[in-house]
Image (cartoon, rainbow, N blue to C red):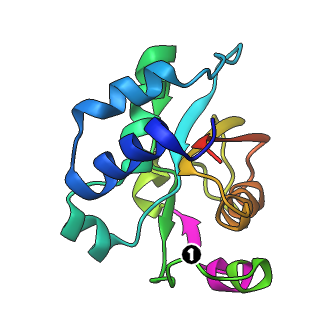
Amino acid sequence: MRYSGVVRKIIKAIKYRGSYDMVAELVGIWNLQRLDGEWIITAVPMWEPKRKLRGFNQAELIARMVAKRWGMEYRELLTRTRETMPMYGLKREERIENVGGAFEVNHKSQTRLAARQVLQFSNVQRIVLVDDVWTSGATMSECVRVLYQAGAGRVVMVSVAR
């Protein structure tokens, strides 16, 4: 969907006014096709102090709703390791630099992961990575890089709006 009109208003209401009830509405109008087979659903993480201040991560709320509708498991597979600058107003190269190295595997979820030389996603071969808005793809690409480096078999990136 395009990040304009009603979709933009709904996303902003969720993000900035805490309109949690709108998450179900947003996912309901999102024409996201269910994937066949077993997948783990995860979201692009927020910087923890920002998440605590806001009280939630809108991408996580959306991802949890997708997981529920698809009857799949949601896991927080990633964590943000540092604060990044807001992306609006940045050129593509600046966005890539901004999020470079800003994510890692969430070690709290390591109980479901097998540790070897490099973390391996032992039973997490296919992952759906969810975000609210896709602009340049820099954030999603960095998250995917970390997931593959940790042993993910396949990662599909989805966002509500672009």
Question: Where does label 1 land, which residue?
Answer: 88
Rendered residue at 45%/83% (across/down) = 83
Rendered residue at 44%/48% (across/down) = 59
**Res 28 → quadrant:** top left
Instruction: Look at the image and tell me whether residue 112 can be seen.
Output: no
Q: Where is residue 120? Give x, y as percent.
A: 69, 52
Q: What stretch is highlighted in magenta?
A: 96-105
Q: Where is residue 153? Give x, y as percent.
A: 79, 41
Looking at the image, residue 50 sits to the left or right of residue 129; the answer is left
Residue 30 to residue 114: above or below: above
Verify whether residue 98 appears in magenta: yes
Q: Crowding at label 1, few (<14), some or many (≥20) Cα neighbours within 10 Å?
A: few
Looking at the image, residue 91 sits to the left or right of residue 56; the answer is right
Q: What element carries label 1?
A: loop
Q: Which amino acid does label 1 sit on?
A: Tyr
Residue 139 to residue 1: above or below: below
Residue found farthest to the front: 5
Instruction: Look at the image and tell me whether residue 127 can be seen.
Output: yes
Rendered residue at 36%/41% (across/down) = 61
**Res 150 → quadrant:** bottom right
Q: Nearer the viewer, residue 135 or 55?
A: 135
